[in-house]
Amino acid sequence: MPRPDFSAMLRWPNVPNCYGWLSLDQRGRWRMRGETLTHQGLKDFLNRQYGHDEQGNYFVQNGPQRVFVDLDYTPWILHLAAPDRLETQVGETVSELRGAAIDEEGNLLLEIPAGIALLCDRDLPALLPCLRLANGAIADDDALLAAIEPSPAAVSALTLVWHEQHLPVRALLRSEIPQRYGFIASPQVVPPGAAP
């Protein structure tokens, strides 16, 4: 993934960070104070400057200022850009899947090189045929309902078949996702002198 441009920080090192203005929703849309952004140039800028710090706070680098991002769920949202191609919300093609999980709400989560990603709910129906039972059959409604129950039986009940990969689908609780994958859903101001 491309890295944000931090060069402006060298010229203006004391610009305060911004919190609570910018968010990323579960469909990968940027929102400013709750309003969906529609200006393509602004969205492109936000996509190019999106990054994270060592603590797992996601932000957009705006010149010398970091505008921290509140995440409705995960830091990455995936879309089916074509029947056989996944893309992140910033337009990067995903070349590798490292794991798969389903939460108690039926959301499909995929581990990608950049971190954990939520598949956009609008694309989930198209990807459902990739969820298979142990015998290779496409998962039916009963199997999907069983998989969203976090239990040992659900851990190995489904497999995601994608580009010849066969990834076991784990059952996870949504509340566990940020800690498990090392990100902060709602970055907060760190008082001066406090440890990050």
Image: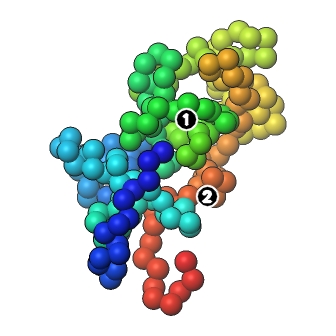
Q: Is residue 177 above or below residue 170?
A: below
Q: Nearer the viewer, residue 188 or 149?
A: 188
Which element type, helix, strand or loop, lies under badge 1? loop
C-alpha span from label 1 to label 2: 19 Å
Which element type, helix, strand or loop, lies under badge 2? loop
The location of residue 66, given as percent across then percent down, is: 35, 67
Few, some or many residues within 10 Å of mark 1 (<14, 14–19, 20+):
some
Image quadrant assignment for residue 132:
top right
- Decide if residue 142 is in sight here: no
The location of residue 123, given as percent across then percent down, is: 45, 25
Few, some or many residues within 10 Å of mark 2 (<14, 14–19, 20+):
some
Q: Nearer the viewer, residue 182 or 154?
A: 182
Q: Which residue is mark 2?
A: 182
> Please, what is the three-letter code of the amino acid marked with disc 2?
Gly
In front: mark 1 or mark 2?
2
* Residue found at x 48% / y 23%: 85
> Please, what is the three-letter code of the amino acid marked with disc 1?
Asn
Q: Is residue 194 above or below residue 32?
A: below
Q: Which residue is mark 1?
A: 107
* Residue found at x 47% / y 32%: 93
**In the drawing, does residue 72 fall left or right of residue 174?**
left
Image quadrant assignment for residue 149:
top right
**In the drawing, does residue 147 fall left or right of residue 13?**
right
* Residue found at x 69% / y 22%: 165
Way the structure is coloured: rainbow
- Decide if residue 157 is in sight here: yes
* Residue found at x 40% / y 60%: 59
Q: Nearer the viewer, residue 91 or 33?
A: 91
Q: Nearer the viewer, residue 21 or 55?
A: 55
**In the drawing, does residue 172 fall left or right of residue 71?**
right
The location of residue 196, given as percent across then percent down, is: 55, 77
**In the drawing, does residue 64 fall left or right of residue 125?**
left
